[in-house]
Image: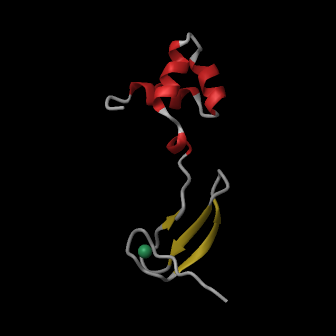
Amino acid sequence: MVTTKYKCKNCQSENIVLNGKNRSGSQTYKCNDCGSCRVLFSVKKTANINLDTLSKTYEERNSLRSTGRIFEISHITVLNLLKKPNR
Ligand SMILES: [Zn+2]
């Protein structure tokens, strides 16, 4: 049997326990040493989005909401990604 030890992101302690799921359904962990309650393996939805493709889609006169539907992110996230200064 293989067990993996997870560490607290705050204090690097291995004394952590499962603490239910948050509103979006991600597993949260609670550290028994420092008391912090966090998601250890967060999934960033915008990590796989090519920003050039996103801006080209928007420049083809698609609306923010339709661009968001194409990339399956919210229109606010599309706006924030387009406003990002160094792309
Ligand atoms: Zn901790």
Query: Is 47 placed above or below 78 here?
Result: below
* Front-most of residues 70 and 65: 70
**Which quarter of the rendering shows the C terminus?**
top left
In the picture, measured across the screen, residue 19 lies left or right of residue 10, that is right
Return the residue found at the far left: 86
* Front-most of residues 38 and 83: 83
Query: Is 75 placed above or below 37 here?
Result: above
Residue at 56%, 44% in the rendered image: 45
Residue at 45%, 30% in the rendered image: 81
Residue 12 picture location, percent across and down? 39, 76
Tell me the quarter of the picture where residue 9 sits. bottom left
Tell me the quarter of the picture where residue 27 sits. bottom right
Return the residue found at the far bottom: 1
Query: Is 59 placed above or below 85 here?
Result: above
Quadrant containing ligand 1 reads bottom left
Residue at 54%, 56% in the rendered image: 42
In the picture, measured across the screen, residue 84 lies left or right of residue 42, that is left
Residue 29 picture location, percent across and down? 56, 70
